[in-house]
Image (cartoon, rainbow, N blue to C red):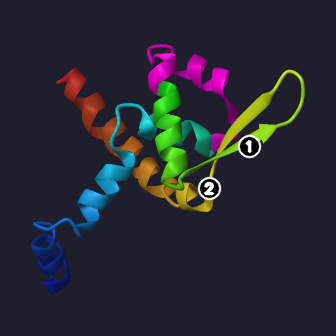
Amino acid sequence: MTKKTDSLRELCITDKCPMRRVQKLIAGKWKLMLLWHLGEQKRRFNELRRLAPEVSQRVLTQQLRDLERDGLVHREIYREIPPKVEYSLTPKGRSLLPLLGELCKWGNTHLTAQKTA
């Protein structure tokens, strides 16, 4: 291991640990999936519900609020009748897309192989 990796591991016994801070941002059963779908395009609430029908409306609302509060998702409210709200990724949220892509590839490689083994 490198000195940099070792010092990061030592830091991770404190609340200043970068891994802990990232985990707090994306912790939540549906947050990664929401970020992934919002990486494709802007989405309305009901579109997100259709993409994940197993998520309750309450949980979906809370997870989107958390992502918005943490600066990963932008919520645009259009003042029209009926009201329209769209969710999209902020630049900070978009910066996670390469990492999410790697997680998706890892899952495809390792979890698919696991099912057939």
Snapshot quadrant of residue 115: top left
Residue 76 numbered mark, or none: 1
Identity, as a three-letter code, of the amino acid under mark 2: Thr
> Residue 62: image x %, image y %?
47, 32
The answer to whether residue 63 is left or right of residue 112 is right
Mark 2 vs 1: CB contact within 8 A: no
Residue in the picture at 72% in, 36% down? 86
Q: Quadrant of the C terminus?
A: top left
Compared with 58, 104 (above or below) is below
Residue at image x 20%, y 82%?
A: 4
Q: Nearer the viewer, residue 47 or 69?
A: 69
Q: Dot 2, how many residues are within 10 Å of its Cα: few (below 14), some (14-19), or many (20+)?
A: some
Residues drawn in magenta: 40-59
Residue furthest to the bottom: 3
Which quadrant is home to the N terminus? bottom left
The residue wearing badge 2 is 90
